[in-house]
Image (cartoon, helix red, strand yellow):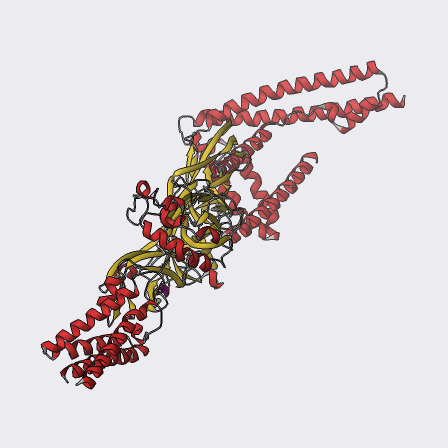
Amino acid sequence: MNKKKSLVKTVVTLTLFFVLFTILAPLSTANPMDRLYRCEPEFLITWDEEDVNEPISPYSAPTNIPIKIQVKIRGVLQHIVSPGYAINDFYVRLYIDEAPEWCKVTVNPPLISIPVNQDWELANATLFITLDKDSPAFETSKIKIRITTQRMGGSATIIPAGNKTLEIPFTVGYVPLLAINELEGNHKVINPDDTANFPIELINLGNGKTDIKTDISSVPKGWQVKTISEISLGVKYLGDNYKKTLNLAIKPPYDFGYHEDREVIEISITPYSNKYSNISGESYVLSFVVHSKGFSTPGFEGILVIFSIIVVLFIVKKHKLRNNKRNQSSKRGDD
Amino acid sequence: MRNKFLTIGLLFILIFSSTVTSSEILSEGEENDDAFPNIDEQILQSTGDSGSTSFGLLRALFEKFLDFRFRIGTAMMGTRYFNFQLFEPVSVRSYPEAVDIEYLNETTIEIGAKNPENPDEWRLLLNTINGYDWGWIYNSVSFRFELLLPENISQDALTYRFDPEIVSISPNTKNLDWKGIDEVLKTNLTLELKPSGDSTNPTQDMILKVKVIRIDVSNPRNMRFAPEFANFRNLPKNKDKLNIWSAGFRLQWNTFMGFYFMLLNSGLPDIDEKVDSIVNILVRIKKDHFAELIPPKPIDIHPNEVLSIPVEVKNLGSHIDTFNFRVNVSDDSLKVGQPSALTMEPGETRNAYVTVSAPPVLYDQGKTTSIVIEVFSIDNPELIFSNKIVLTTQGVYVSGGYAYYLMLAGIILLILIALIIVPMRKRRVKICVKPQKPWEIPEEKEYLKKLKDKKEYNKVFNMMNEEYQSALLWYKHYRKEMLAKYHKKISLREFSKQAIKKITSFFKMPKKIMKKKDIKKSLIKLKPEVKKVPKPKEIPSAKTAEIEQKAMIDINAQQEKLRREKLLLKIKRKQEKQRRKFKQSI
């Protein structure tokens, strides 16, 4: 009986020691039970797909993409850790990890504090995106954002540092932009049988391959206007034949008589996307003044010249004959 | 026996739970996110699904135990689970997050941290050093702001200033009257973009980085003892400003915590400078529309002239810009065509052509007009840049068409006149030849030359002149008489018929001329034709036939008379010559 009692006492004493040890262990020494409290931070990051569906164009105002960041802890004893760490906050840091070099992107705020909770805690951030003028049109690219949280705990880690990346895709919009040079001005004085040629230099300043369509709005009666109706221009940043010269040929009316015709010929130049022809820019309207001045011959002027030579020769001959006749008559008179 | 069983059971649960769960957690990672619910579920299932009240009780007891254990672990600083963070990281950001900056315009951005409890307020520096409870450990804490410009832009392109450049708070351990106690973690960044044609100037959007540098000045020895304002005498009056300090905590600090803290921070430098945060500001260079127009020197324009006047346009704005034009002219008679739109890179210069058409006036004595040319960006039509083209209209204009047709009409008229006058002159010559001036006859001329005596010369010359005057008077009288008779007998209709006949005969000639043998014949034939002109045969009127016949007789008589007179004159001259020769020989 005494043996039994002593055994029970020993066991109880040992148990008490053990319980005391496990209870007091968190104060100083490491214990396998520390891992029982360990909780992982979990992230749920969402954004509205509609915000990134629309292509982002260079020169436009910054595109704002709101991001919802939700954090919670997940572990065996999350229900114990969560209230225990309620006074602590997650400091969520947001970084732009990767972005194309022609893309300027910031995320704000860069640091968000979110309470530690076993249920989702929400915070908002915004991504601001702008694109350089040389961003390749229609290209789909990605912005990689990294989200980190700090480690939590004392000498034992209860919540390890969190790290998550997300990729937000976006599409580059197309900007149709042209520079037009009238190399030889917009006015010419020509003869009625001449053709006024106006070289027009076209430079693609947009961010994608561009087709140029020309349209001659109205051709005056009797005049002829000719130009290439379609030209394709490359992209400047790729050094891909982005500059071409278009020739506008204007021929005035050429009918017999004296001409002093002056007309204004208008030509509209419209840039279109080479990839999607339904995307077009604003039309550029150019005006050219042609002054046709001079005499236009009927075409058989050579015959007239020959005829007039014959007439002159005939007159000369006749004149000589008359002189001879006079001389003869004067001789007779003398006689 | 029952107690023994209970004791062993309790020990088994404790050991089993700690070993199994920890082994499971050892394999945790990003990939095994699903491990947690399994363990959780296992435990829950192993405890809850049994339905056993005793096991549920055990589970509750176990959880209570773990909860209690966790509370002990987080109870105080230094325990294994206590999450110690002396200072909360401060979220410093820019307000607004993205800004548009414009050339020459100052743009101010607020950079700082807002109070998490009240986002409308800026965060006090005191809060960044954990208030009065912990701030005293520093001698001073400062935040300095530095702007990092992007590498690809000219460093002179952007001027900036921080106001203030540095914010600081200087605590002390004696009292709560700290210097900079009302300072907030905030500065104003003012940016100004310089206009320039320099291609390295920013035209693209950019990210400006502002470094927020925290400078802590502290002395670990100051941490050894609790601050004086937290002693038991000062505590009641400072109670609302101090949260952690109590008499007990002060005692604890002074006993061992202060010492521990001093040791902990002994490795820190007296002045600790570190980048607290970096604020990214998305700066969008607002399109600055600025164009310079350089007109040409004053230009002269003649009536009906069209000029294409080149005007230099320079894009001094910040971006690629498309400029449109508007032209105003005070003189309504001038027609002015505005140039086409120009798209230019920043700093680029191009020519815009203003087409001016002067009115087709015959004579413009000179007038100076100015053409006002206005240029504006299509993105901002309200911002207009203008200059003037000075134009002087002056000169004479004869339309090429008019001149041509006038010349043509003139030639035709000349031909017609020639066709009329030539036969008329011929006819007159036939009627009567104008007497020749005697002193112009070569022989007479020679004779006059030989006369050296002036009196003799004058006498001979006067004689010749009188002779000529007399012959001229006769000639005029005779011609007048003859023409009057001719004009009476020939009507206009007849004259025109004759003229036509003449013309047609003129053009019929070549066939006959071509035959050399017939030349003589043709000449003979021509003779009567010429004579026929003045003949009144073709005059149709029958009543005047008698008169005409008489006139014809008169004309013949006159012609005969004229011939005789001519002969007499000739004989006279010859006699005179002979007389002179005779005199000379004598």
Residue nearest the viewer, comparing B425 with B570: B425
Q: Where, quadrant-wise, is the N terminus of chain A in this rendering? A: bottom left
Q: Is residue A164 above or below residue B87?
A: below
Residue at x-position 56% and y-position 34%: B422
- Image quadrant in which the C terminus of chain A is located: top right
Q: Is residue B410 above or below residue B10?
A: above
Q: Where on the picture, by quarter, is residue A315? A: top right
Magenta-colored stretch includes residue A149: yes
Which of the two residues, B377 or A194, is positioned nearer the viewer here? B377
Indicate the position of residue A54 as horizontal and vertical percent values.
29, 59
Whether residue A200 can be seen here: no
Position above or below: B96 against B294: below
Q: Is residue B278 left or right of residue B469?
A: left
Q: Residue furthest front?
A: A2
Foreground residue among B322 and B171:
B171
Q: Which residues are magenta?
A: A141-151
* Residue at image location 47% in from the left, 41% down from the top: B291
- Horizontally, residue A128 falls left or right of residue B36, namely right
| Above or below A199: residue A318 | above
Residue B376 colored in magenta in the image: no
Image coordinates of residue B406 in percent, x first then y, are 48, 36
Q: Main secondary structure of the magenta part?
A: strand
